[in-house]
Structures are given as C-alpha cells and as structure tokens.
Image: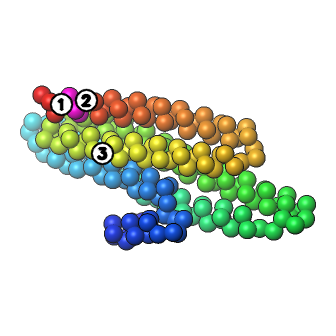
Amino acid sequence: MTQDLTVYTFLKELSSKSPTPGGGGAAGLGGAVGAALGQMVVNLTLGKKKYADVEEEMQSVLEKLEVLKTEFIRLADEDGIVFAPLAAAYGLPSATEEEKKHKEAVLEENLLKASLVPVSVMERAVEALGLMEILAEKGSRLAVSDVGVGVQFIRSALLGAKMNVSINTGLMKNREKAVSLNEQAEKLAQEGTRQADAIYAAVEAALKK
C-alpha cells in the first residue's frame, strides 16, 4: 500500500523495472501531495483573527481535502491492482477461436477497468482544484505560494491520468466506449487545466504585490 511506504521506498519501486507503481501510481500520489499542501494552507489560516470570517469555510475545505487526499492514495494503489489482471490477460492462450474470443473478452474487461481508475483520478483532481481556488483567494497570504505549488501537483495528476486513459482506450475493441471515455477525459483535462492555470496566475499576481 502506498500509504505504508516511505518516500524513498516508493521512489525506489517507481524507478525499478516493475510496471507498478508506474505513471498511474505517480499521478495519484501527486494529487495527494497537492491536496496535502492545500491542507497545510488551511491549517495556517485557521485560528487567525485576520481570517476569522472564513474560519467555517476553511474547516469545510480542510475536511474535503482530507477525503480527496485519501482517495488519491487509494486510486494510486488501485491503479496497480487493476494492472495485474490486464497484464495476465495478454498471456492467455489464443491458439483456437474459442481461446481467442475468451482472451479478447478478458482483455476488453480489464482495459475498461484500467481506464476507469485514471478517469476517477481526473475527477478528483478537478474537485481538488475547486478547493485550491478558494484557498488562493481566502487562505493565509503567508502561504499563498504553497497554493501555487499544490495546484501544479494536482494539474500534473490530472494530465498524467489522462495519459493512462488514452493508452488503455487505444487498445479497446469497443470503440464507442473508448471514444466516450476519451471525450470524458478530454473535458476534464480542459476544465482542470483552465482552472489550474487561472489559480496559478492569481498566485503569481499575489506574490508580486
């Protein structure tokens, strides 16, 4: 489990020839890092007289980011879990027509599962960016740069996950479903990158004041 690994151990596993953790796991972890940075900003805002009027809102943001952070880590692990049966499916026999049909059906099922996990990462990333936007506007000015850093981690998680959607849908036989997933991913990517870039620009502007 990703949450049980030290940073060094995770990076060691990531740099090895083992296919998991890979880009999907890294994307999930990146999203979790971004959410955690958002939580840090909240914690630096809570209890300060200057921000008393947003105390309740900040507490809500903190709780929502905790849920998202946990989800990002879960999805980082889920990415590895769904990859195993997909990798095994490529080794299924295909000497007869019956075997070929069975192999194709198993591959299709597991390619779909492997596509849905990164879509979920993208959905969580867009949710997280909505919360980071609040922090960029209302969080402690002393930590506004951390909002910008967190946004970039979440943006990377968003677009990294999109790559994992594409590589799996590209192999699916059900092209209607593949196109639908690609369109969903593209919509999330466009929405998320627009928001992330706007937040980052706002942070940069705040730092120049």
Q: Is residue 101 visible?
A: yes
Which x, y percent locates residue 89?
Answer: 72, 64
User: Is the Cβ of the residue at disc 1 closer than 8 Å to that at disc 3?
Assistant: no
Q: Residue at x 73, y 68 (%)?
A: 91
User: Is the Cβ of the residue at disc 2 closer than 8 Å to that at disc 3?
Assistant: no
Q: Quadrant of the N terminus?
A: bottom left
Q: Is residue 60 left or right of residue 181?
A: left
Tell me which corner region of the image, top left, top right, bottom left or bottom right, holds residue 144. Answer: top left
Q: Residue furthest right?
A: 97
Of labels 2 and 3, earlier in sequence is 3
Q: CA distance from mark 2 to mark 3?
A: 14 Å
Residue numbers of the magenta segment: 202-206
Q: At numbered mark 3, what does the secondary structure look like: helix, strand or loop? A: helix
Residue 58 lies, with reference to residue 91, above or below; the image says: above
Q: CA distance from mark 1 to mark 3?
A: 16 Å
Amino acid type at circle 1 is Ala
Amino acid type at circle 3 is Gly
Label ID, residue 177: none
Label ID, residue 206: 1
Q: CA distance from mark 1 to mark 2?
A: 6 Å
Of labels 1 and 3, earlier in sequence is 3
Which x, y percent locates residue 154?
Answer: 38, 45
Q: Residue at x 20, y 49 (%)?
A: 43
Q: Residue furthest left?
A: 49
User: Is residue 8 in the magenta section?
Assistant: no
User: Is the Cβ of the residue at disc 1 closer than 8 Å to that at disc 2?
Assistant: yes
Q: Is residue 124 visible?
A: no
Label ID, residue 202: 2
Q: Residue at x 33, y 29 (%)?
A: 198
Which x, y percent locates residue 93?
Answer: 81, 68
Residue for badge 3? 150
